[in-house]
Image (cartoon, helix red, strand yellow):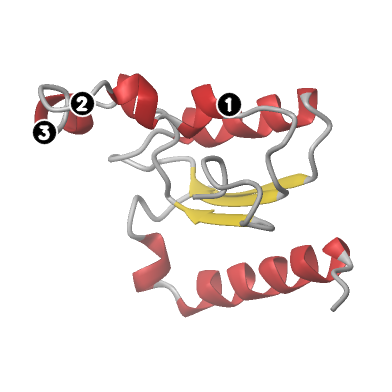
Amino acid sequence: MAVLNNAKVQAGAYVSGCYDPSVDSWYNTTIGNKADTKKLSPLLMLDANAPPQIFFHTKNDEMRAYQGASEMARKLQALNIQHELVSFDQGGHFFVFSSPEERERIKKHLAGFVQNLRWTN
């Protein structure tokens, strides 16, 4: 939504996201015969109009590679768009459900990210 509707969405926040379905075997197996997964790829759609974005991802995510979040951050950096990649060493894809400490860490980073946006009414 943050990439496709960048005129309406003011920021994006992702937890264990899939940033390029075209290289994801589940998406290609499930959706590939119905739609071009490259057209569903936030990574491939990013441009200078993208809103600020924050990513929360574990380095050992077995379902969505950490590399995708890293690539999003690199591309946003190259486009000079505000972003943050908050990395977690352990926990796998569903880390947020098993760790109150990690949920608290996410909450603090997200609050700080939003505060730094300095939105006005």
Instruction: State the residue position of label 3.
Output: 30
Task: Identify the residue at horizontal 33%, vertical 59% (top origin).
Answer: 94
Q: Percent from the top left, x then y, of residue 86?
A: 64, 51
Three-letter code, disc 3: Thr
Is the C terminus in the top left, top right, bottom left or bottom right quadrant? bottom right
Residue closest to the eye, 110 or 105: 110
Of helix, strand and loop, which one carries label 3? helix
Instruction: State the residue position of label 2.
Output: 35
| Badge nearest the viewer, 3 or 2 | 2
Three-letter code, disc 1: Glu
Residue 71 badge: 1
**Which numbered disc, 3 or 1, marks the residue that appears first in the sequence?**
3
Q: Percent from the top left, x then y, of residue 105?
A: 62, 70
**Which numbered disc, 2 or 1, marks the residue that appears first in the sequence?**
2
**Relative to residue 35, is residue 103 depicted above or below?**
below
Question: What separation in Å lies between label 3 and label 1 (alpha carbons)?
Answer: 23 Å
Quadrant of the image occupied by residue 26: top left
Of helix, strand and loop, which one carries label 2? loop
- Residue count near mark 2 (Cα–Cα under 10 Å), binned few <14, some 14–19, many ≥20: few
State left or right for residue 111 relative to residue 42: right
**Which numbered disc, 3 or 2, marks the residue that appears first in the sequence?**
3
